[in-house]
Image: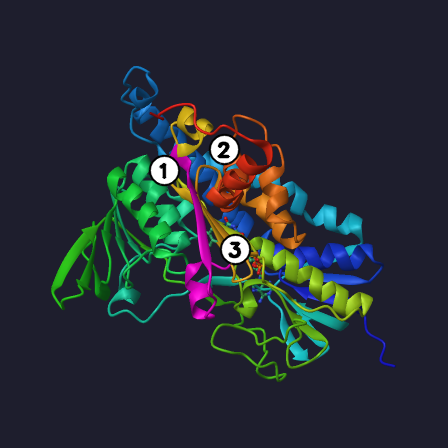
Amino acid sequence: MANYDYDMGIIGGGAGGLTVASGAAQLGAKTLLIEKEKELGGDCLHYGCVPSKTLIKTAHVYHQMKIAPTYGLPEVAPPPVDFREVSRRIRSVVAAIQEHDSEERFCALGVKVEFGQAQFADSHSLSINGRTYTAKNWVIATGSSAAIPPIDGLSRTPFITNREIFYLERLPASMIVLGGGPIGIEMAQAFNRLGSHITVIQRGDQILAREDKDMADTVMETMRREGVDFRLSTAVVGTKDLGAEREVTIRDANGGISTIRGETLLVALGRKPNTDGLGLEAIGVELGRQGVKVDNRLRTTHKHIYAVGDVNGGFQFTHAAGYEGGIAVSNAIFHLPRKTDYTFLPWCTYTDPELASIGMNEKTAADKGIDYSIWTEAFSSNDRSLAEGESTGKIKLILNEKEKPIGVQILGPGAGNLISEWVAALNGKVKLSTIAAAVHPYPTIAEINKKVAGNFFSPKIFSDKVRKGLKFFFQLKGRACGQA
Ligand SMILES: Cc1cc2nc3c(=O)[nH]c(=O)nc-3n(C[C@H](O)[C@H](O)[C@H](O)COP(=O)(O)OP(=O)(O)OC[C@H]3O[C@@H](n4cnc5c(N)ncnc54)[C@H](O)[C@@H]3O)c2cc1C
């Protein structure tokens, strides 16, 4: 049997790679982790989830200051935002979390960390910094980067992506956002709230294309009321650098051509897998359009090389990368064949209101030909939401033909947290009647979960049939008010 330097080699020290590294090392596997940046943590920590959620909170506070009178408070006119201070806060939150993802912490777990750009020499060996390391198993966890499509003039026009946006020197007076996906939309709302004039250009006829249109449209209408300019069904024809401003030429749904100008151009048009320079083609690892091709055990064309996280082009979330990291560890270290199952993978877009989802929505249920039914409850009927002044949105529960829950979408305050009850319920196959009967504390926004489940049972319990039966058996006297 070949004698390798390591049991497990991992390329990429982000959400997926770090999960594999800590899991493998703690199980006793001799583990090597390779990262090309100066620090561990990946996109999520440095250019993704953490800075974006920190920025969103800052923008939320500033927005609350501006809408103080809606809470019965005196009107205040806060001074303009100094973005260097916002960036400073972002950096401090990133630095605090970085400590959990430090080289020292992983070394203490038993992981050898190497920094540098790695390239496969053969399917078991990898060269980095002039040295070659061999490993029995490899995990590719190199993540993704902003996709830069071949738009006419874009290569000559200064633009920013998620790598630059959190660390700007000043707040742009105006920003054109190319792309109406989660990243573009979260940034559009946050920067608009901080004081930039925002225009979002989206090719499709709704933002957040993966979501049901009614939910996505409510997000858009909320943002529109706050001042964001949306151009839907609009194609980007080209871009131009005008010195102090960027110009974007667009074509609307009727074929009309016009231009928009903005100080800053944000490209948020999807992601591309980070596979350049790894030498994957040379060692025969097959690549697809979305990323490294994997089977349902996350194995590439070489069964001892796995690909987890954004790089395999599947669900591009931190928790998906972590989940996949665990699957790779099970398969490679435990030798327990474990397959991926994304049936109840939740996600959330952190706009205000947030839009969270688990399981099927109406779009996916309809695509699968499921004869579904929908049960809803509006946040405007939730006492706590009214007290909080956050009553936009609703919860949507989707049942299949057998009246079993197959999905939930929540558009409302703290939806990302509220969906967790459904994460437990759907994964644990908890009966809807249990959720409807379980006592939830009052007044909480989470009561909406119980309420929507109750909405399914109400027409059955309070039906004419039940009323007649009770009247017959127990001689109930019926209505006391409104009767002649
Ligand atoms: C603006 C933004 C906001 C986001 N918000 C959320 C959110 O709220 N919730 C959520 O779940 N997800 C969010 N995401 C997505 C999330 O960041 C990714 O899904 C997650 O980081 C994927 O983890 P990963 O391990 O696959 O990749 P990463 O975390 O990016 O890690 C990949 C690592 O590999 C390294 N690497 C790349 N190439 C090489 C190489 N050749 N050699 C060595 N190392 C290499 C990289 O430097 C990086 O450290 C957001 C993304 C963005 C851009």
What amino acid type should be assigned to the residue bearing mark 1? Thr
Q: Residue at x 41, y 43 (%)?
A: 394
Query: Is the residue indicated by label 1 positioned so its CB lies within 8 Å of ligand 1?
Result: no
User: For numbered disc 2, what is the local secondary structure?
Assistant: loop
In the rendered image, which residue does mark 3 sit on? 407
Quarter in which the N terminus is drawn: bottom right
Residue that appears at 65% across and 62% down: 324
Residue range highlighted in magenta: 355-380
Residue under label 1, please give it: 392
Q: Is residue 130 visible?
A: no
Circle 3 packing at 10 Å, graded few (<14), some (14-19), many (20+), is many
> Among all residues in the image, which is located at the extreme right?
1
Does the beta carbon at disc 3 come under 8 Å from ligand 1? no
Distance in Å between CA atoms under marks 2 and 1 = 12 Å
206 or 447: nearer the viewer: 447
Question: For residue 369: magenta?
Answer: yes
Q: Earlier in the sequence, mark 2 or mark 3?
A: 3
Q: Which amino acid type is marked by label 3?
A: Gly
Q: Nearer the viewer, residue 429 or 483?
A: 483
- In the drawing, does residue 268 fall left or right of residue 235? right
Name the residue nearer the viewer: 292 or 35: 292
Ligand 1 shows up in which quadrant of the image? Answer: bottom right
10 Å neighbourhood of mark 2: few (<14), some, or many (≥20)? Answer: many
Mark 1–mark 3 Cα distance, whole angstroms, equals 21 Å
Ranked by sequence position, the earlier of labels 1 and 3 is: 1
Look at the image and tell me whether residue 163 can be seen.
yes
Task: Say left or right for 432 vs 200.
Answer: right
Instruction: Give amino acid for label 2.
Output: Ile
The disc label shown at residue 445, or none:
2
Within the image, what quadrant is residue 180 found in?
A: bottom left
